Amino acid sequence: MERITERAVLFGGVYNNHLALEALLADAPTRARDIFCLGDVGAFGPHPDRSVDLLREAGVPIVQGNYDRSVGLRRGDCACGYTDPRDNRFAALSYAYTFRKTSERNKDFLAGLPDGIRLRGPRGERILLCHGSPRRQNEFLWESLSPDPFLARLLGDAGCDVLAVTHTGIPWKRRLAGGRFVVNVGAIGRPANDGKTHVWYAVLDLSGEEPDAAFLPLPYDHERLAAEMRAEKIVEPFVETVETGWWTTCLEILPSKERAAGRY
């Protein structure tokens, strides 16, 4: 039987940011009873086992992201979906660190995560939580490249009324005809390329006449995270993003509208 939820905290892209995750786990229970992680526990940050262990200890249901699958199945790359050589070079550095530092126990755990979680709303709304999209774990659903007819077909093919995803790292939401709804919950692992040092998570609300979501800022000790990253000899461009709020890597995948909103 599918779990029924009226209000749920949704977050994705932990990216080894155990400090932001700790902050979220402290704040989330004040927002909703149900809490879900939409995947990619590992990536840019330090000490990957800390984030996995926090989620396991808290009992948070996790959707398998592309990072989780690759690490869990002991694959050679993150299968992030990048196409540009520069993006792939930085992705390879990030993945090599995370893979090397993740315990065998946690690799086995990540390998067994589901690629989607289905819920029901209070009025029978069919809710699907996935990582990239219902079609592909590493598909980027950008706001500027996701017209309503495309999203409506995506929901129809997936058999859901409400779709929640992550993977892009930038939050957005869209209400469609017929009470259907799409939300990209962003990422808590690094800033949303907005010049802010806090990160974002979402609260999905099904208590009203139509589904909605609120994006909440999540402050955390980003200076401590930057220090830990440097101590682990993680490449400086990743640290710079944590300190400034602007992406310095994995930029070539950004559509022109989303890239224009950043610094680089």
Image (cartoon, rainbow, N blue to C red):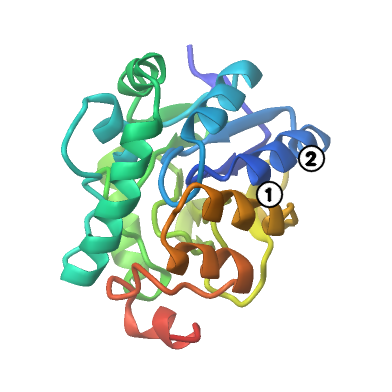
**Mark 1: amino acid:** Glu
> Residue at (29%, 31%) from the top-left corner?
71
Task: State yes or no: discs 2 and 1 in contact (Cβ < 8 Å).
Answer: no
> Residue at (39%, 13%) from the top-left corner?
105
Please identify the quadrant where the C terminus is shown. Answer: bottom left
- In percent of width and height, residue 116 lies at 37, 31
**Of 247 and 48, the residue lying toward us:** 48
Residue 38 located left or right of residue 152: right
Residue 243 located left or right of residue 68: right
- In percent of width and height, residue 209 lies at 68, 49
**Mark 2: amino acid:** Asp
| Mark 2 residue crowding within 10 angstroms, few (<14) / some (14–19) / many (20+) | few
- Label for residue 27? 2
Q: Which callout, 2 or 1, points to the residue nearer the camera? A: 2
Q: CA distance from mark 2 to mark 1?
A: 26 Å
Observer able to see residue 194? yes
Q: Would you name the residue on which mark 1 appears?
A: 209
Q: Is residue 171 above or below residue 224?
A: below
